[in-house]
């Protein structure tokens, strides 16, 4: 599969030409439209890592420890885990 470097408003990512999936900050998105929903809430130049919990994927901010999931920022990993656990009930 060929991957092409991709930039959206200075956020750097990759595009898989075979599937149209894109990857930004280590998180895979179905397409660029889905990625934009997240990228609009991220600051270029900040460091984010992919965050996983109980089959959910988000991003965690390197300095603040805030977790971005479901198009919102949550204050801590523990808070985000509780939020996900409550969604299942």
Image (tube, rainbow, N blue to C red):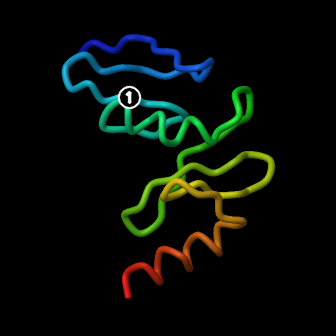
Q: Residue at the right extreme?
A: 63
Q: Residue at the bottom extreme?
A: 89
In the displayed structure, 40 sits above or below 66; it is above
> Is residue 42 found left or right of 24 in the rendered image?
right
> Is residue 78 found left or right of 31 in the rendered image?
right
Q: Quadrant of residue 65?
A: bottom right
**Circle 1 sits on which residue?**
32
Residue at x 48%, y 41% (from the top left corner): 37
Q: Quadrant of residue 16?
A: top left
Residue at x 41%, y 61% (from the top left corner): 56
Q: Quadrant of residue 30?
A: top left
Residue at x 26%, y 24% (from the top left corner): 20
| The N terminus, quarter of image | top left
Q: How many numbered dots are placed on residues in this image?
A: 1
> Whole-percent x and y of residue 73?
64, 58
> Whole-percent x and y of residue 14?
42, 20
> Is residue 55 found left or right of 53 in the rendered image?
left
The one nearer the camera, 49 or 71, is 71
| The C terminus, quarter of image | bottom left
In the displayed structure, 19 sits above or below 54; it is above
Q: Secondary structure at mark 1?
A: helix
Q: Sort mark 1 into few (<14), some (14-19) or many (20+) by Cα contacts within 10 Å.
A: some
> Is residue 80 found left or right of 70 in the rendered image?
right
In the displayed structure, 2 sits above or below 13; it is above
> Whole-percent x and y of residue 34?
38, 39
> Whole-percent x and y of residue 42?
65, 38
Residue at x 71%, y 34% (from the top left corner): 43
Q: Residue at the left extreme?
A: 18
């Amino acid at each position: 599969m060929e991957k092409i470097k991709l930039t959206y408003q200075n956020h750097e990512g990759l595009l898989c030409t075979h599937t149209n999936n894109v990857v930004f900050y280590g998180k895979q998105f179905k397409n660029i439209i889905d990625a934009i929903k997240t990228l609009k809430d991220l600051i270029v130049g900040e460091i984010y890592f992919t965050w996983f919990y109980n089959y959910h994927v988000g991003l965690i901010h390197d300095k603040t420890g805030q977790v971005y999931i479901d198009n919102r920022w949550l204050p801590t990993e523990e808070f985000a885990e509780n939020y996900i656990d409550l969604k299942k009930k």
